Amino acid sequence: MSTSTKKITLTEDWTVVILGFSIVLLAISGFLLPIPSFGWSNSTELFTKVLSIDNLQKIIIQLVAVMVVSVIGATLLGNHIKPFLTGLPIVYMLTILALIITGNKTIKSLNLEAVIFSLAIGLLIGNSIKLPAWLKSALSTELFVKIGLVLLGTSVIFSDILKSGSLGLIQALVVVISVWYFAFWISKKLGIDEEMGIMLSSAVSICGVSAAIATSGAIKGDSKKLSYVISLVLITAIPMMIFMPYIAKVMGLSQEVTGAWLGGTIDTTGAVVASGSLVGEVALKISTIVKFSQNVLLGVAAFAISIYWTYTNNPLAKDKDTKPSMLVIWERFPKFVLGFVGASLLFSFVLSADTVSNVKDSLKNFQGLWFALAFTSIGLETNFADLFNKDSKKPLYAFLIAQTFNIFITLVIAYFLFK
């Protein structure tokens, strides 16, 4: 007599919620990961600080934590564990290299983010050599970035945004709606497929990479299209981050207006902080508030898009008049967004200010690490030629047109709200 057991597995989104909240709860319980130092200005500091025994121990502890989380994730998903044991350390060390490069004083002065170097290193290696199968199997891009998104929720504190003023929320709402619809409209005019158009529109209007990932989860988007949109976001964020503060100065804009303009236009949170700091303390504060206000809308947008996509692309419908049930909508909804919203609510309304203060730095560091790992993975699995081939021209044009519209409409709104 033989018996068989059925392996119980979870979806990726529920796995991410479990992993993300486990990390948060462990941090609240006092299990805080050490934060390695990556700042250096010369070779002496590089070896005595960044590559010191003490700092290398912190880096190794983080590696162990990443591998434990990834192995648990693979187990819950029913995937093989071996690729994470063999390939993930390599992805991690490439990511650490990007963090070390970013930590250089000269690079810091340019306000370039670690994820940009993570992507660049991945693209360089991935387009120079053929990656072995065991390394490709460790490139769980969406798992990495979704864990980072759940942890991002711990930094979206509603009370801080509300205390700093409702104008940021008003601007975020107006900008997101107007820019999203314009970007979606221009995508349709250029004949871009709806899936790409939705991801592109969300990336331009809400909060760049995070919105693209959330939208992709809501519509079960193609990973290659997602990687393309993410690459566009990061590539365009660099010149915007560098030149917009100087353009604002030439135009004679106040720090308040400049900060609102930067926060509503630049697509990545780190780039917003970097560009705001180039202008001044007030601009930095306002730009951060506006960007966090847009982050708050991430969950709402993902929910709305998942409903829209389910109604317009209902696989169970026999005709266009058949409406999907609430069960179908729930099945299509990106569950990891619940982790993002839950973490934000937990840190906004449940935990004490002291507890939040004690754990925020460690969680922010770990969040940044997951994002950097994701972008290293994206670079390794992306063919650079695919980003600029003839089939990619229309999405590129749509993105640039929508981003230009975003720059002008956000400037007008910021001027009237913050002048």
Image (cartoon, helix red, strand yellow):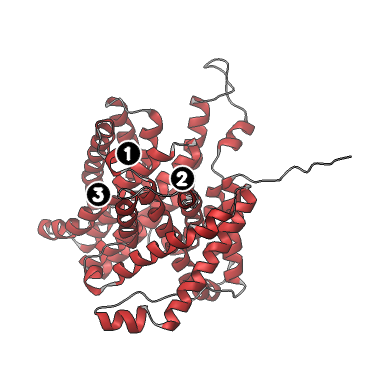
Viewer-side residue, 143 vs 356: 143
Measured in 3D between alpha carbons, the distance from the residue under mark 2 to the one under mark 3, in whole angstroms, is 20 Å
Q: At numbered mark 1, what does the secondary structure look like: helix, strand or loop?
A: helix
The local crowd at label 3, few if under 14, some if 14 to 19, many if 20 or more residues have their Cα within 10 Å, is some
Is 156 left, or right, of 397 in this rendering?
right
Residue 308's spot in the image, x, y percent? Answer: 48, 31
Mark closer to the chain start, 2 or 3: 2
Viewer-side residue, 131 vs 378: 131
**Visible in this render: residue 287?**
no
Q: At numbered mark 3, what does the secondary structure look like: helix, strand or loop?
A: helix
Residue shown at 32% from the left, 39% from the top: 178
- Residue beneath label 3, please? 236
Residue 284's spot in the image, x, y percent? Answer: 29, 65
Mark closer to the chain start, 1 or 2: 1
Measured in 3D between alpha carbons, the distance from the residue under mark 1 to the one under mark 2, in whole angstroms, is 19 Å
The local crowd at label 2, few if under 14, some if 14 to 19, many if 20 or more residues have their Cα within 10 Å, is many
Measured in 3D between alpha carbons, the distance from the residue under mark 1 to the one under mark 3, in whole angstroms, is 20 Å
Query: Which kind of residue does numbered mark 1 sit on?
Result: Ser
- Residue beneath label 1, please? 178
Snapshot quadrant of residue 192: top left
Residue shown at 52% from the left, 33% from the top: 307
- Residue beneath label 2, please? 214
State the residue lying farthest toward the top.
319
